[in-house]
Amino acid sequence: MSEFSKNVFSHYANVTPGHLMIGGVSAAQLATEFGTPLFVLDEADFFDRATAWKQALEQAFGDRAGTVYYAGKSFLCKEVTRWLAVVGIGLDVCTGGELAVAQATNFPMKRVQVHGNNKSESEIRTAIQAGVATLVVDSFQEIERIERIAAELNTIQRVFLRVTAGVEAHTHEFISTAHEDVKFGFSIASGAAWRAIHEVTAASHIELAGLHSHIGSQIFMSEGFEAAAAKLIALLAQYRDEFASELPELDLGGGYGIAYLPDETTLEPVGILTELAAIVRAQCAAHGLSVPKISIEPGRAIVGPTTTTLYTVGTTKDVVLEDGGIRRYLSVDGGMSDNIRPALYEAEYHAIIANRTSSAPTINTRVVGKHCESGDIVIRSIALADDAGPGDLLAIPATGAYGRSMASNYNHVPRPAVVAVIDGAARVIVRRETHEDILALDQ
Amino acid sequence: MSEFSKNVFSHYANVTPGHLMIGGVSAAQLATEFGTPLFVLDEADFFDRATAWKQALEQAFGDRAGTVYYAGKSFLCKEVTRWLAVVGIGLDVCTGGELAVAQATNFPMKRVQVHGNNKSESEIRTAIQAGVATLVVDSFQEIERIERIAAELNTIQRVFLRVTAGVEAHTHEFISTAHEDVKFGFSIASGAAWRAIHEVTAASHIELAGLHSHIGSQIFMSEGFEAAAAKLIALLAQYRDEFASELPELDLGGGYGIAYLPDETTLEPVGILTELAAIVRAQCAAHGLSVPKISIEPGRAIVGPTTTTLYTVGTTKDVVLEDGGIRRYLSVDGGMSDNIRPALYEAEYHAIIANRTSSAPTINTRVVGKHCESGDIVIRSIALADDAGPGDLLAIPATGAYGRSMASNYNHVPRPAVVAVIDGAARVIVRRETHEDILALDQ
């Protein structure tokens, strides 16, 4: 893995006077050729990060390394599935729509895992027929449905049980609770997980391959992971004691943190996975269990830092604040339709002027979109050059995850294209929508 | 206007044992015929509400009634523009995409007004060429652009200036401030509005038709509106004093509140507009001004209550809470992709079981979607019949505004169809997306 891929902000070490380069192409040239707003995905960086997680899992767990499942919900398109196939990792999908992307490129179904708290019967049937590796079972109703549909299709479907360990992970801490007030999974503490294990084990067309537990989002440290691991591995031991065999696999989910701001750090795969491996090994040893195959589901951690959004500045406006200071409103040609995260999660982003250098002093700036809504904010507060204005190109790093993936047509704004750049060449992997595309649904 | 249209919850007075009727069609039949999730729009209700706002403006302001501009951002499609044309009201658009909808049905451009804090030059050009009634000018840069483009096109463009009155409207109160920290408009207090008036007045290809001021969202009372009106009308008087003529029109924007929950009330058009008229007349009299033509921009207040989302329940799950109580998670086949408002604004909604009656006791229920995200919540807490479960049809009222309009393809979930029902007949006005539609953008 290159130094470049360790932290998205090393991107900006490449800023040469006058223009930002991404994948060997200048941002200004990309904007001219493909228009803005534009998602620019650094393809080599995607391969580096996907490969890094695969190698780190192998390095940390050795022959107990399971599969890296890329979390498709973060960003999925046909080209991404082709890349995953080349890297040799798996794909985690949540819906029939995400599965359809994988099917469209003949992605190997034996490396596809299907999540979802409310899979439809049609989605279950399609997934089983397609031959996916694993369904991650999320409710008692689903056990009955999978058993019935697998029986109809005369097959045995491999599943994980999604369990909740009673550990809440926040960005920098884990809190152990007896309860998990979430829609996902079977609670270990309430006994639901144990009952589900019995139901699945009794079902004749379901093979229980292991447990799945997702412990949080934007996790940066393993501290506290012991609490979750202890409960998961105690459940594996309880299974071994009851059924006299060991469950072969444990999927630890995703949630690995990345840098959105220059003073943040993207989690380093080998570091975190080595820490998790030590914890898992110790807990298994304590229960006399062999270490199960360990799988993980990074999504944001692979695609998030690879992508930069390019916007063109349209207007500026200075507002006098209550303290007498000035806020510069800088409006770009996209906004909450292509990045809902600031409005939805108060997520923070960084920006740089991508088409030129400036020695102007900075001014307190709020970067806003073009939507008819006050909450349409890209960056709430950032010091930007005082001379930034109409026609300038603004680059927002780390927009690869949950940007295009959650994009809307609010205000009938067409969704931006996604362009992959590598070795000085750029090509469209998701084309820009048009007004005609949007109107095509109208009668 | 029928009793029915005064409060969305009178919909549910029509619940006959066994099924909810909307526009003379049973919800169950709609779900069977068109699938779920489904937006069901009561067409007669739309006409009633649009007509009610038009008549109320005329009743309240007499010959000073300007135009009701339907705020297209709330929900726009080709069929809606046809309805607006029949009712004889105007359309407020924010982007070239919304304008393209109106153009697609030859909606009269003389009744179209164009908003936007960052209109592109292409959007400005298209709007002027199309012959829209008014551009609502939002920045100094835009004044230069409109003047230049109108000159190139050898025309004179009519505009409003969007001004900020230094009054913050919250749901139940208005707060007068010297500052407005928003991206929209020219501040009256800072002098920006006055400078903009001078610039526009000096421009030879721009005709200043009046002022525009939008005072908030989900407003229920006129109390405090005096503060905003006083500043707006003082500015009109200042204009008259300086230019020895009166600006002919004042657009008060939208933001009229509707009921989302059974104990809330949808604002009654005649009531609120009569109150606003009294305030405007008094302020104008105090300045010796004639009352300008008054225009308004209801969006949510027209379409919001007309529409009901139908979901099918897929799974249920009971979770033990910290206080020992139970929370029932009830998962439906849509969620944050078709209604982002609960996640984005903590918006609250109501639900009823639409396909049957139940005499079961109720249970503390959280209605959640099928997306792979904990925040994918439709209703955070509601008492629903204990026997509600898989296969039941859930109706969520008042989803007409900012539902389909802000919908995404998160998790590659196709966006629902919108069906208009009237006089016992249903027809698709926006068709359901397919996986193929989504994949059509992929290369």
Image (tube, coloured by chain):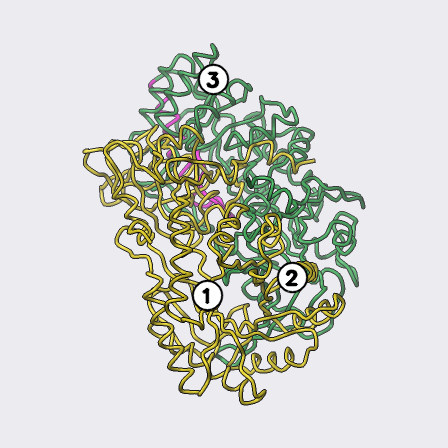
Chain colours: A green, B yellow
Q: Position of residue B318 (x, y in %)?
A: 29, 35
Q: Find out whether residue A379 is within the magenta segment.
A: no
Q: Examine the structure image and report whether residue A218 is included in the region drawn in magenta.
A: yes
Of helix, strand and loop, which one carries label 3?
Answer: strand
Dots 1 and 3 on the same chain:
no
A158 or B434: nearer the viewer: B434
For the record, the magenta segment spans A213-242
Q: Which secondary structure, mark 2? A: loop
**Could you tell me what secondary structure mostly forms the magenta stretch?**
helix
Tell me the residue at 57%/43% (across/down).
A405
Name the residue tied to disc 1.
B296
Work out which residue is located at the far top of the displayed protein and give it. A154
Q: Is residue B14 above or below residue A244?
A: below
Q: Which residue is mark 2?
A: B131
Which sits in the foreground, B330 or B281?
B281
Q: Distance of mark 3 from mark 2, alpha carbons? A: 62 Å
Residue B11, given in percent of the width and then of the height, sits at 30, 45
**Amino acid under disc 3:** Gln
- Residue positioned most to the front: B63
Q: How many marks?
A: 3
Residue A69 located left or right of residue B260: right
Give the spatial CA distance, label 1 vs label 3. Answer: 59 Å
The numbered mark, 1 or 2, whose residue comes first in the sequence reads 2
Q: Chain of mark 1?
A: B
Chain under callout 3: A
Query: Which residue lies under the disc numbered 3?
Result: A157
Question: How crowded is the residue under tag 1: few (<14 C-alpha within 10 Å), some, or many (20+)?
Answer: many
Closer to the camera: disc 1 or disc 3?
A: 1
x, y percentage for residue B144? Answer: 69, 73
Q: Amino acid at mark 1?
A: Ile
Q: Quadrant of residue B115?
A: bottom right
Q: Is residue A105 visible?
A: yes
